[in-house]
Amino acid sequence: MNFRTKNGFRDLQVVLKELGLYGGVIDGEWGPGTASATVALLRPYVEHIGRGPLDAASLPSRGGEDGKIAVIALQQAMASIGLYLAKVDGVWGKGTADGIAKAAGLYVSKHRVPSYDLCWSKLVPTEFARKVTVGCAQRGYPQAAAHWLMGCMAFESGRTFSPSKQNNGGSNYFGLIQFGDLAAKDLAQTYKADITLDKLKKMSQLEQLEWVFKYFDMWEKRGKKYTQLEDFYLTIFYPAAVGRKADETLFRKNSTDRMEAKSFLQNNGFDKNKDDVITIGEICTTIYDIYYQGMDPANRVVNP
């Protein structure tokens, strides 16, 4: 299954869990639980437009190896009730996502369901989550960017969100996005500020968060664009990799370049298939796994 389809299913599962319709794992696998919960999501819309009852068997219990069977069936079901207007092609895209969002909006209007704060918001004070939301909105980032940034900080800080959290491998990187000496010097020079790594790691959560935003501002001025989760994470991890294809190699264990070989050893947890090569896709797979764990309502605060 390709990345787009798997993440589309995971986004759907997040919505279904938020609405209390799905009790399974957010794993991107289309199964009986996801199918039946999606039918339950669509039924109020069917009733709203005055159509007959939606058959529980209108969506398959299995999506096929590539998920295309499920996507086609979902697009056909939504097209039949006016929620999907594009070509039925089995490709998860904006039209499919927009149809789900519209159905979810109607479901919320008809049922008393809680709304949830940011990804991993149970791990931080309310003020911290609010500052992330406001900071992303002020910069015109995509709507989901506050969730993405929280996912990145959760991963980098080992889910502690501590400004003094040291890299698990013991190297000289600290905090919300694992600032290092080079990043601190870059920030100091860019903003003409008296900032050092030692000062960064002694800051409060909110103080260091300001510098997290300054870090992204700095790279945006250098041409980085933040349109998806991996743009944020790769800007933290290896800015030169932003925009590169998923199958491109970043580090090799047996590289003749000593720095590349060292980077592989420092980050060998990303080598998912244990082939001694780390690709962009493997890095993205890891950060998306952490992100979707954080999007589970169990790890988010209920909004008042």
Image: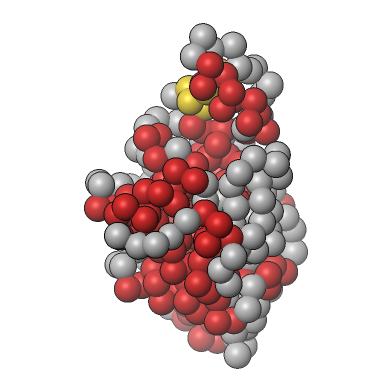
The vertical placement of 178 against 199, above or below, is: above
Q: Is residue 258 visible?
A: yes
Residue drawn where x is 69% and y is 62% of the image: 160
Quadrant (top left/top right/bottom left/bottom right) for the C terminus: bottom right
- Image label count: 0
Q: Position of residue 143 (x, y in %)?
A: 39, 67
Residue drawn where x is 58% and y is 39% of the image: 285
Give the colouring mode of the picture. Answer: secondary structure
Left or right of 186 in this view: 146? right
Q: Quadrant of residue 159?
A: bottom right
Q: Is residue 16 visible?
A: no
Residue drawn where x is 60% and y is 17% of the image: 253
Q: Quadrant of residue 122?
A: bottom right
Front residue of 160/278: it is 160
Q: Position of residue 18 (x, y in %)?
A: 62, 71
Quadrant (top left/top right/bottom left/bottom right) for the N terminus: top right
The vertical placement of 173 against 39, above or below, is: above
Q: Position of residue 287 (x, y in %)?
A: 57, 46
Q: Position of residue 268 (x, y in %)?
A: 65, 29
The vertical placement of 253 against 58, above or below, is: above
The outermost residue toward the front is 194
Front residue of 70/126: it is 126
Residue drawn where x is 59% and y is 11% of the image: 254
Left or right of 51 in this view: 9? right
The vertical placement of 105 against 98, above or below, is: below
Front residue of 275/236: it is 236
